[in-house]
Image (spheres, rainbow, N blue to C red):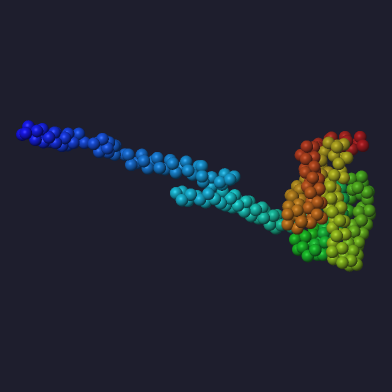
Amino acid sequence: MRTCVTLPIIALLLGASATTAFPSTASSSARAMPKNAPINAAAGGRAQGRRQLSSKNIGAGGDLVQHPAFGLRGGAVESVAAASSSTSLSAGIGLVEACGLAAPIASIFVSLSPFPTVQKIRRDKSVGDLPLLPYSSLVANCFIWMIYGLLKSEPKVWSCNSFSTILGIYYFATFAKYSPKASPTLPGSIAMHFKAAVGTILATLAVAASMSKSKAASILGSAGVAICIALFASPLAALKTVFKTKSAEAIPLPFAIAATVNCVLWFVVGWFDMKDVNIWFPNGMGLACGLLQISLKLFYGDGSKAALAEAKQAA
């Protein structure tokens, strides 16, 4: 009887001892976990969040949508694109405005560009092979555009052309004083150029006085386009002489350069600002003529005097 009681007591004591000596598996695993386990768990959470972002937070067309963890907004890409487009548009408008301010000044420089050539004519008392057409067409062209600007109420047009008309009259008078009465390079005769210029002025005044502003502006604009192209192409009247003598001395380089720059500015203003075909079209043609003149001047130069004299004797 004593033995039966003793055995259960011993078994109970042994079980308690075993529990104390060998703790449970869960408690042992918890104590064996390394200290950086929470960090690894957090990293895993972030990786899962990124996977969710890539799969759930990229909308149609690749746009990012708002995510609670990262605070991304769906219009971010569109906002950047809109800001870039607005900046480009502002730069374009600024360029057009700058051309609008520079174009009248450039027109005055075009009118002043023949001044050194005319002064050389005064010193040499000879026009050489220079054509009269640039100066006679300058008078007619600038007078038409002066009236056109007044009819259209465009100060940037009439102001510079008023000044250019006065200069054109001075150039014409100086050239006529030292020019032969007729020459192939004029072309024609001085009397013919004079009648054409005066007739253009009288016809312009008659149109402006007898018609409504809109109709008169339309007619004078068309006439101005034709004369303006003649003005910019006028140095090419000596083109035959240039090819025959292998010399571009008859092409005034200052006028060609000034006219080319002027045409670029007025083309931009006419196309983008005024939206007036009577402004941008002739200046586009003038740009092409100016580039051709500059190319011939750079290719042939002024040539040698001996070659010029030989070519003239052969002619």
Q: Quadrant of residue 142?
A: bottom right
Quadrant into which the N terminus falls:
top left
- Asked whether 186 or 174 is in front, the reply is 186
- Residue name at image x 58 percent, y 50 percent: 78
- Asked whether 184 or 98 is in front, the reply is 98
- Residue name at image x 82 percent, y 61 percent: 148
**x%, y% of residue 118?**
81, 52
Quadrant into which the C terminus falls:
top right
Give left or right: position of 304 versus 210: left
Camera sees residue 135? no
- Residue name at image x 89 percent, y 66 percent: 211
Camera sees residue 310? yes
Give left or right: position of 147 versus 97: right
Give left or right: position of 193 versus 63: right
View extreme (front): residue: 1
- Asked whether 79 or 255 is in front, the reply is 79
- Residue name at image x 76 percent, y 63 percent: 155
Q: Is residue 288 above or below residue 8?
A: below
Count the marks: how many? 0
- Asked whether 254 or 162 is in front, the reply is 162
**x%, y% of residue 233?**
84, 47
View extreme (left): residue: 2
**x%, y% of residue 169?**
84, 58
**x%, y% of residue 272?**
73, 54
